Amino acid sequence: MNFASDNWAGAAAPIARMLAEQSGNFVPAYGEAEIDRQVSQRFCELFERDVAVLTVPTGTAANSLALALAMKPGGIALAHAESHIIADECGAAEFMMGGGGRVQAIGGADGKIAAEALAGHLKRFDPPFLHHGRAVALSLTQATEAGTVYTTGEIAALAAQARLLGLAVHMDGARFANALAHLSVSAADMTWRAGVDMLSFGATKNGCWCAEALILFDPALREAAEYLRKRSGHLFSKARFVSLQLAAYLDGGLWLDLARHANAMADRLRDGVSASDKARLAWKSQANEVFIIIDRPTEGRLRTAGAMFYDWHRPHWLSAAPADDEIICRLVTSFATTPQEVDRFVELIG
Amino acid sequence: MNFASDNWAGAAAPIARMLAEQSGNFVPAYGEAEIDRQVSQRFCELFERDVAVLTVPTGTAANSLALALAMKPGGIALAHAESHIIADECGAAEFMMGGGGRVQAIGGADGKIAAEALAGHLKRFDPPFLHHGRAVALSLTQATEAGTVYTTGEIAALAAQARLLGLAVHMDGARFANALAHLSVSAADMTWRAGVDMLSFGATKNGCWCAEALILFDPALREAAEYLRKRSGHLFSKARFVSLQLAAYLDGGLWLDLARHANAMADRLRDGVSASDKARLAWKSQANEVFIIIDRPTEGRLRTAGAMFYDWHRPHWLSAAPADDEIICRLVTSFATTPQEVDRFVELIG
Amino acid sequence: MNFASDNWAGAAAPIARMLAEQSGNFVPAYGEAEIDRQVSQRFCELFERDVAVLTVPTGTAANSLALALAMKPGGIALAHAESHIIADECGAAEFMMGGGGRVQAIGGADGKIAAEALAGHLKRFDPPFLHHGRAVALSLTQATEAGTVYTTGEIAALAAQARLLGLAVHMDGARFANALAHLSVSAADMTWRAGVDMLSFGATKNGCWCAEALILFDPALREAAEYLRKRSGHLFSKARFVSLQLAAYLDGGLWLDLARHANAMADRLRDGVSASDKARLAWKSQANEVFIIIDRPTEGRLRTAGAMFYDWHRPHWLSAAPADDEIICRLVTSFATTPQEVDRFVELIG
Amino acid sequence: MNFASDNWAGAAAPIARMLAEQSGNFVPAYGEAEIDRQVSQRFCELFERDVAVLTVPTGTAANSLALALAMKPGGIALAHAESHIIADECGAAEFMMGGGGRVQAIGGADGKIAAEALAGHLKRFDPPFLHHGRAVALSLTQATEAGTVYTTGEIAALAAQARLLGLAVHMDGARFANALAHLSVSAADMTWRAGVDMLSFGATKNGCWCAEALILFDPALREAAEYLRKRSGHLFSKARFVSLQLAAYLDGGLWLDLARHANAMADRLRDGVSASDKARLAWKSQANEVFIIIDRPTEGRLRTAGAMFYDWHRPHWLSAAPADDEIICRLVTSFATTPQEVDRFVELIG
């Protein structure tokens, strides 16, 4: 019953197998090998257009490189107050943007930025006022840290607003596959067709060891991105070890299968919790993260039985606070979660 | 006959096997798993003292995090003009140091910093003069980019000079194992006992997929290092995939066996070249890099036969320039180089 | 009737005179002249202890250098949401802190940080959690951007909280003299005796051309501060031109006289507005900034008559919003404001 | 007999007078006043084209902002090894460039970059090679730190080379007036007509208190420059105090008169030294810096008599080293130097 995080799981078997099988031979380093080109090509097909693909070690690296690419003198990026970029990356975005780059927090229910809230923040930069700096990027998280998913319409509306002031639009897709599987739309529809310029494509949480890629829908940004990646120490020498993972990941739709499984396990959890009167959903999530409210005795029972999960803080949008003896818990499912684990957990809640 | 670089090789079999075998199960992310602790412990034994171990994605990350840890307002680091930090990391050291940190180049024969040259550079900072900035770190490369190896005495002498002005001493050990195997001393003797404070311990070039570690001989630096690593996007979530590689690498002395093999292949190359009158050593190297001078027809013959290697620039210390129709080539051997490849190469030279 | 800002005024006569009289002779550059030493000594007397004094070109430079001095890897500074550092310096704090430093906004009525709000923010960093970064500095503005003034007790309480987690405490004293004149306490009581470590001592707004100083109550920080100031381009060569201004400013209590005058003019404005039924105070300020709510016709009347002032945004703490046809205006008085201007303005309100 | 530096002098009388006369009244802050516009206009006339003018506190600020404007991901700037940017600004260029920007040193006789030396350095970036970074700017110092002056032809040749690889060309004009007065060409000919994109226009050393301006020959860079200036704390609030100095400085050709005087005093020194057999010129300079070689007894005699000047290091190009008992001295003349001082100094040499 491990619901601590999807990054506690290891590698899905086809990923591990690919690495084992391809560990020999000499191939060019630094992303110049045939497998690296193949993976780039595979992404072009997936996104139905020419894209630049830069593999990087971590989602944090992908996110912060993206914002760094959008950086201009005086630049400020905008993101949801609960976004990973703001809340859980120790300031990596500001670090990589450099030049005093700042990420400004926008509140919003269910971990999503509302169109009006974005408008309110943009007003501060329009007309331009030197002392305020200038907005250069909007970052959206899909699926959000609250386990919710923006519709393509919501993404398009936010991106259109951002575009009016010349902001670049970035999508933090640490759980891209889970969102895509939930919406059942194409990868192109959920990204560039909705106005997204740059995507952090996360694969680590969904079955790889270490496979993250920054996808640039404007390949003209590639040159700058490559310098940034190298200069920040994020260019692998034996880059094929990431490409091999991604090749296996994308092959035959494995990635969506893994995500669908994780989502289904989360649905099963949501259903179980909703049916119980000892627990309730803190809010309605959609992808592979489930947030529930339980009381302390229930928590104790679960932990004693070996369930792993994190206590969670009360987010700013949650008006109905948990009672004094209640806590919010985050439960994350993954490709490796089993129905048995879920059922046992629900059973323990009672 | 692939002598392009040791990072063109894949993963040694025991490394790949370890990853394949341990790809299942849930374990804590971000370096908090049992295997992460075991590897740290293994490094403490190797270095015969308490050390802080931070795994990172690349040698560039390790090097630049080390210099960042030594950074102070006004700080300047010193390194050999041909060091990877200065010549081949696209400015990563300056990027990570931040605050205007600069790496200043010191020349020196055979890729090594001479004690007098260091003294000359340090004079500029002693007594302190605001407008010059202040020296905060000395970085030594072991083995050097020229394939040479500092003796422990040379390291100790340089470190002692640096210490007088309060500089931290960093060792770029991208080819640490090759240097150690060549010198046949202990890891402790080649590092902290000689005055080294921080080590970039490279394992990728010597048989791992991706396994680099920053070793801090003063564990009090760990806290700052962890914030820097996270903030710069270099903290792996599924960190065990690096630890597993390192566990296999260090187990039973595999790492030194791999390095000894690479060095022996380089010795075989050096011997072959020395015996030929169609080629000569550009200078005398000691570890797994060999620099030779050949004429264009010989180069053509080698390349036609499928030999892979890089042309090399003439380093500043090389007073005897190659003739007009000659070139300098760099040949790198690795754990995967075979005696047959070497012999065939030598035979082709004629 | 110029209430636009205190930085629209020029230089007070004794300041201008001092510069004119001392424009000849050769004296050492870069702050090494006798006059520079005298001014430092004068500050030591004023603060009743040894302090390090670094003159800088702007208040923004002083503020951001202070935060940069407090910076550590992973560092985050805390300041009021309406502070100049966050709202009006274009991100200078983050720029100078470097290394991904971030200034996090704390809300609070009347432009002041409340003790409970600070406690709430600090909880996020205690116990330390790598992914959150670590808090390294608290910045208080005295007088605040809302024209209010912290009591020495309030400062001491906030500083004590910050100290518990090891934060440095900075005071943005762009209007230090106005606050001090209002409280009628000693400079020492309002700063280091209340727990302040670093002070941006502003003199430009209160009668100088260009005279700002970073005051360090721990002179051991001087060395780092000097490197930072030089490296960021803020060390004047003909530094005496600032010292001369400060000498005249501090001489015979001129600075407090100028501030008392500005405050008295603000009091006169507040009294006038309070007595009118065509305008009201938006909130109760205390130093030389006055925030009033008037309707559009009144505004038109004032502007037509030549009154200069800025429209102001509705701050987050203001629950009673202005009516639809009303606006908030900021009125700033200075050493150069005359009672006649104030009276005429009040008369125009009606 | 003060030859220590031109920044030891105070302000020329017309500059000081202008400040004293214009210290009253309210005018818009932050460079929005009428006088600020007039000075910009004056520069457009001087340079015979539309230029963007940004006043800044120091020459270091102007230089480093210029390089920051040229910065791109992976960027490296090139400058002479003895340039102020590399040798005497404590790393300010790297600080302001941010993002790991580096300034790479090019040697060259008499403080000037030779065309072949530049070509040699540029080869490293052409064709582009990720691991080397990319060259983004060339900075030339006019007059150089060695007191020499590039001809307009030399500037044009270097700029043309730089332009081929897309580098921006910056001129550090801390002693712009001295160079211009020496060459007797137009300001346009010595800058943009020769291929210069950005100029640090220094006035402080030549008779102002504090007046430096960054001149952008491509006004499209203004927006970025303004954000950078503000964010780095270099935007004055009472900006008119700089504009007033510049207005007086440029008025009626005062600036060139001051520079011609300083140059004439340097010529007088050079002549005196050349005629003596107790001293000799270390090399032939042209503007207001003179470098001489004297023996220790002569030095003692001069210092005893109250002469002020700095010992100087032996620059890398000086093949004929001073004898063991000799030293190199730097003598700087300024608008405030008198013929009597010069003559007395020469007389003391004997």
Image: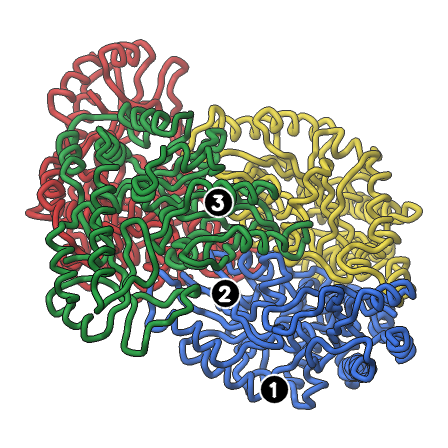
Chain colours: A green, B red, C blue, D yellow
**Circle number at residue C104:** 2
Q: Position of residue D75 (x, y in %)?
A: 51, 38
Residue drawn at the location 85% of the way across and 75% of the way down:
C337
Q: Tell me the distance, in whole angstroms, between the alpha carbons under discs 1 and 2.
A: 23 Å
Please give left or right for residue A346 compared with residue D311 in the image.
left
Tell me: residue B187, above or below residue A13. below
Tell me if label 2 and label 3 are in contact, CB under 8 Å. Answer: no
Q: Secondary structure at mark 3?
A: helix
Tell me if label 1 and label 2 are in contact, CB under 8 Å. Answer: no
- Location of residue D82 by image quarter: top right
Q: Position of residue A173 (x, y in %)?
A: 36, 44
Mark 1 is surrounded, within 10 Å at the Cα level, by few (under 14), some (14 to 19) or many (20 or more) other residues, namely some
Chain letter for mark 3: A
Mark yes or no: residue D326 visible.
no
Tell me: residue B163, above or below residue B93. below
Badge 1 and badge 3 both on one subunit: no
Tell me: residue A61, above or below residue C318. above
Please give left or right for residue B190 compared with residue B25 in the image.
right
Residue that badge 1 annotates = C151
Q: Position of residue D118 (x, y in %)?
A: 57, 30
Q: Secondary structure at mark 2?
A: strand
Chain letter for mark 1: C
Badge 2 and badge 3 both on one subunit: no
Question: Please, what is the three-letter code of the amino acid marked with disc 1?
Answer: Thr
Residue that badge 3 annotates = A68
Question: Please, what is the three-letter code of the amino acid marked with disc 2?
Answer: Gln
Is tag 1's residue or tag 2's residue first in the polypeptide sequence? 2
Residue drawn at the location 9% of the way across and 46% of the way down:
B253
- Location of residue A283 by image quarter: bottom left
Tell me: residue A144, above or below residue C70. above
In the image, D215 versus D182, the foreground residue is D215
